Structure formats: structure tokens, C-alpha cells
Amino acid sequence: MANITVEHLAKVVGTTAEKLVEQLKDAGVKGKKTDSTLSEDDKLKLLAHLRKSHGKAKKDISAPKKMTLKRKSTVTELKQPAKRRGASSGSVSIEVRKKKVIGRSVEETCTGLSTEELEEAKKAAAAHDQLVQEKGAAREKEQGRISKNLEVKEQVEAGKQAKLDAEEAAELAKDAEQSIAAAKEAVVVNQVVDKKSTDTAAKKAQAVARKPDKKKGGGKPGGRILHVDKKPRRKKKSSHRTRDIRLESDDKHAFEVPTKTITYNVEIPESIIVSDLAQRMNVKAGEVIKTLMGLGTMATINQPLDQDTAVIVVEEMGHKVTLRSDEDIQAELLADVIQQDGEEVHRGPVVTIMGHVDHGKTSLLDYIRKSRVAAGESGGITQHIGAYRVKQGDSMMTFIDTPGHAAFTAMRARGAQITDLVILVVAADDGVMPQTKEAVEHARAAGVPMIVAVNKMDKEGAQPDRVRNELSQIEVTPEDWGGDTQFVDISALTGDGVDELLEAIALQAELLELTAPVDVAAIGVVIESRLDKGRGAMATILVQKGTLNVGDYIVAGEAYGRVKAMFDEHGKWVKAATPAVPVEVLGLSSATEAGVEMYAATSERKAREIAEFRQVKSRQARQAKQQAAKLEQAFSQMEGDDSSTLNVLLKTDVHGSLEALKTSLTNLSTDEVKLVVVAGGVGGINESDVNLASASEALIVGFNTRADASARRMIENRGVSVRYYSIIYDVIDDVRDALSGLLAPEIREQIVGIANVRDVFKSPKLGAIAGCMVTEGFVRKDLPIRVLRESVVIYEGQLESLRRFKDDVKDVKNGMECGIGVKDYNDVQAGDQIEVFERIEVKRKL
């Protein structure tokens, strides 16, 4: 019998192909689909399964009958389950009579089943469909009955509740009437009876009040009584009587579960961490993480989210969004701090001295201070930004000295931003240098006027005209040449021209008409900050508006605190600082960044609120940076990046030097070697710094700082490398050398000898032997060689043998003959050249 498909058999039997596949699967015939073919064994297994499922005894069906010659009647029983619960199941008997058949029908031929088996399969499928329909109808009927009963029950309970509420309201009204009547009666009694009768009446009233009220459930244990006054107390010359107050409770919780979805208006800043976002929506952080996973983003509870992602999450969870920028939030926090109103008074100018390194900026300031206040400072290059006050005429001038080294670009930019006037110092013997041009750009960007001081006029090689020509090329034209910039020739060593420079500064300040309010909350700028071992965090602040007093609450960057003490540039204690006055402030919680603004707050709570907001934003930015670094490191590992890394831990005396060193050292990185500043801070080197350097295998760089005793012991025990510096040149040079040592050496090839092939001999052991004459240098056996034919390289390899007069030798010098055997190469011909070379490693530098 030919095999047929499942779909064809389903059409013949009168059922669906999917149902037939399920029946085949139950019968043990697995892996069949609607277009799969069925063998005789598969059909027999299906038939046996159908017989068994309908309760008929198993019989031998190993071979289907080919033809039927006598009348045969078959009785088939189908069991039906009970339609109602508790009723007995029934059975239906079906009798099928067959006529004598000589041939086979088309269905029998296609399926391979006998007529009896085919009819039995059709009946079983029909009975199965009927049972499924009956079960569905019974299920729907039962569900309808249950829902109807629930509606009736709810209506009955609602009616009972309404009735109970009406009865309770009537009882409350009745109790209120009785209380009013009792109060009126008490008033009348108090006016008529004397003190003795009043006491008797009060005792009776107490006895009545303590009796349980059966109507109100006072005698039941479920009631709760709150006694306001257990004993009657009497005041002198008072006829009032006290009574107990009873409060009844049905022991039900007052909280009801909300049935309506609560929608919140969520404010989203530019960056927010997952836990904060969950708190604003009043949900658990796990719900937010689950929503992010549904959107295809894996996040942790402390991971920062950008504003766009947070908006999608909030809208996905059904809440409303309000976008807020960090500037708006910070402006709202500072709105209560900044005071606009105030009487403007005259103030002194703030002058910043800028220029190239070693052009005499600090020497000029030394001469001004020495001639005015008899104070000087040591030589060397300036590595900190400093502020000093000098009296000129009737007013005080504030001078800010900035470093001239290339590493201190940020310091010079800060000096230009907070100043009223820039003094550009240019050496007459050196001319315009890179940092001179940079200082001009900073002054222009800040929009402040500039005075050029041509220094070192006492030297023999001084060329002031050259300085003027070079500055005019960058659009700084002297007034003598038709420009708007004052030029003053000075000598910081002898003092020539310094008075003229100070007069020019005073004249420029009068033209600017500098004023500032005094009777308002102070606003200033942090010029420099450091960590003093005995005092703590110290910040040099230049007051720009208002008056800063001892005891004021201030906030500067991420630090806040109360001003405990203030000192001027000479270390003297001061009580108050007015506009354009630099002071060193003690009392901040930490050493803040240089260049941030300082505000005097109304209270410590307000100052802490502003500082904590900035700390959160800084922490989120740090976490985002760390996340990006981790991704970058993972990608570099996937790409097989072989670049070397030098880890450095920086500790400096002031924050400005830390900023300059970070920028300078990071700029030394290349594609092959990278420098990573694992940590940086202000103050001495402590144990935690050594632990971090040991864990990250970092080099500790101490700039004008030292390690304490415990840190030194730990450094010796763990073998951590520590370097101390006091000049920024040395730091940059040494770190550059260290990075150069991490560079892979450059491999260079150097030709050491050339031999011309005169003839070729055949050797049974070594093959072709080239008879050569060394014409240049020497030939060594352990060096690589190249075979050249007509000046073209045709082979590169090693020497296998080097002989001279049948003796093996290590090398052959110029002008001598030798026999050369080339390893794995036998095509050497007369006239070829054998070039001997060596590979040498050359150390690279950044």
C-alpha cells in the first residue's frame, strides 16, 4: 500500500490535520507534520490508540484485512462523561452492519484501512468533537450562573449596609439630643443647689455614665473606651463637673486600598540615577530596572541615566514628565542667595600680571611690594597664582601674579576672567614668545584692557622696538603708532619706569569707573585652594561684591562651611573683606576647585543644599566617565589593543597645580602608550594613597608634598615607587622618559658586509656552494643574508655553512675568499651578490 500524507488522511477521516497530528503524537508517532507521510505502522499505531481511548478492548490489528466475504455486524461503545457534577457517566452503543464487499473503496485504498476501521475512526472523531462542544457549553453556563449569584449577593449586601447606616445615623441623632438635654439640666442644677448637693449629683452622674449602654454595645468586649479623666477633679471656686468621654471603635483599619491609578508629575534633570528616578515616581528601583530591561537597556540601581532615556522610562510607566536643566535648578537654589539691590561705591582695580615664563613678572611684583611694604619672595618660576594688595595714591590696587609656564594655561585664563586690567610683561631681549601670544588671547577673550610692560631695559641686548613690531603683528598696537594700547619701558631689577607703570594703571582704573555694592551678601571667586595640615582646607578668595564677614556661611563649588577666620596676604587676621580684597578663608569642608564662584548663604542649610546638589552632579559625571572608560577598555581588549599604560597618582600642595599637572601629563599619551591619572588630591601622601597606588600599580608623584611616617613605612613594605618634585619641568620630563621606556623599540637593519659570487660548486652534503669574494665589510655565519641578482632581492634567509680552505669559520673579513652555503636555497648563480645584515633595536622617545 502506498504511503499517504497526514493532510490527506485527515480529509478522508473528516477531521482537521492539526488534530490528527496531536492524535498521532499521543499514539507515539512523533515528529509528524501536516505534510508528512504515514507508513502502515503509523496508521496501525493511530488506530490502536483510538480504540484504547474510547474504551474498546485491544485486539490484534497487525495486518489489515484485504476483503470481506461475509456479513459482519460490529457494536461500538462510546463513553460519555457526566454533564452535571455528581451524575453517573453513560455509554452509547453503535451497531454497524457491513454488506459483503468484493472490492475496496477509494478511501480504503488511500488510507490502507478496512471499511470497519475507517467507519470506526470517523465515529470516534465525531464523538470527540461533540464532547468538546458539550464541555464548552457547560462551562459557559456554569460561569453565567456564578456571575449572576455574585450580582445578587452584592445587591443584598448593599441593601444591608444602607439599612445599617440609616440605623446608626438615627442612634447618633438620639444620643446628641440626650446629651444636649443633660447639659441643660446640669446648668439648672448648678445654679440652684448648693455645694453638697452638687457633689451628690456629680457622683450620680458618674455612676450613670459608667454603666454600659446596651444599645451602643458598651458591654461587649469589642468596644474600646477612651477615658479623658478617670477621677473628678475640682478647681477652687468652680462648680463644673467632669464626666467621662466614651469613644467606640469597630476595630477596622481606616486605610483603604486606592482603586485609581496615581499619576505623578516627575521632574527630570539632565542626568539622574536609577534610584532617584524610582523615588520620584514612588516605586521600587526594581520596577525601573525591569522597564529598562524591557526597553533593551541593562542598568544598575546606581547607574546614571541621560534625560532622553529617563523620559522614555517615565512615560512607559504612565507618569507625566517635566524637563529641568541643571542650570535652571542651580539658578533657583542661588536665587535666595544672590541679592541684586545695594548701594554702589568706588573700589580699587584688580590687576593681573601675565606673560611668558622668565620674563620678569614676579620680579616686577617683588619690586612693587618691596618698595611699598618691605617684603619680598624667593626666586624661581611661579607655580601658584597669588594675590597681593599695594597702595597707590588714595586707593588700593590688587595684583594677581599668574604662572608663565605652558602647563598653567588654566590658571592664566582664570586670572584674565577675574581681573579689571591686564599687565602684559615682555622681555626686551627675548621678544614675543608662545605664552605671550596666549596671554593676549586670554585678555581679549575676557574683554579687559591691557597695558604692555617692556621689561629688562637695563640689559645690553634690549630691543624695545622689536617687541613693538612683534606685538603689532598680533594686533597689539602702541598708542605712539596710532593704536589704543599703552606701552611702558621698565626694569624690574633697577625700578626704572615702575612709577610710570603704576600711574598708567591708576589712569586706566579711573577711566573704567569701577564700583561695587558693599551692603549685600558677598560674592567672590576662589583664586586658589590648598589643604593645610594644622588648619584644614584653606581657600584664597577675591571678593567681587558685598562684604564677607567672619561667621558668614559660604558655599564654593562642592564645599561649604562657616568662615572661622580670614587672613590677608601678610598672614594678619581680618574681620571683614570688601570688594576687590583678596583674603585666605578658613572653614570650608574641603579643598574646592580653583576658579569656582563663592556665595555667602543665609543659613547653613541653604549652603549645604547647594553644595550637595553640586556633589550629586559631580558624582554622576564621574560615574558616567567611569562607565565610558570601562566600555572603552572592553572594546580595546576585543580589538586586541597592545598599548602600554602608565598609572600615576598625583598629590600636590594646591588645587591649581593639580589641575595643571593633570592636563600636562594626560597630553603626553599617544596611541602606543597611555598615561592614566588614577587619583589626584591636595595635601600630603597618606596610607590610603599608598594602598590605591599598590592596588593599581601606580607611580606616586608628590608635588611640593611629602608622605607621613605611616605612609613611608607602608611604601617600604609594599615597594611602591614614589617621586618628589618641586618644579613642574622635572615632573613632565621624568614622566615623558618613563613613557618613552614603555614604547616598543624601533627595529633597524644595518648592512655589515657584501660578498660577490664568483663560481658555484656542487656538494653532495650541502648542495650548491657559492665561491665568493668579500668586497665590503665582513660575513658572519650567525647573521641573516639576502641574495641579490642584478640588484634585486630574490631570497632572504640564513647561512648554512661558511668555509675558508675546507675549514669552517665564524666570519670572513673584507678582501678574502670563502665558500658560502645558503640554507634551503640552491639557485645561487655566478654574478649574484650575498648581502649580510644585522637587526638592531633603537630606543624611541616621545
Image (cartoon, rainbow, N blue to C red):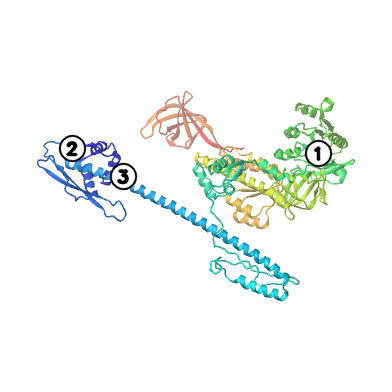
Above or below 146: residue 200: below
Looking at the image, is mark 2 or mark 1 nearer the viewer?
2
SS at mark 3? Answer: helix
Looking at the image, is mark 3 or mark 2 nearer the viewer?
3
- Which quadrant of the structure image shows residue 22? top left
Label 1 and label 3: CA atoms lie apart by 98 Å
Q: Is residue 30 left or right of residue 682?
A: left
Mark 3 or mark 2: name the one nearer the start of the chain: 2
Amino acid under disc 3: Gln
Q: Which mark is residue 590?
A: none
Label 2 and label 1: CA atoms lie apart by 113 Å
Tell me where residue 413 appears, x and y as whole percent.
73, 38
Tell me where residue 478 appears, x and y as whole percent.
82, 28
SS at mark 2? Answer: helix
Q: Is residue 379 visible?
A: no
Disc 3: which residue: 133
SS at mark 1? Answer: strand
Looking at the image, is mark 1 or mark 3 nearer the viewer?
3
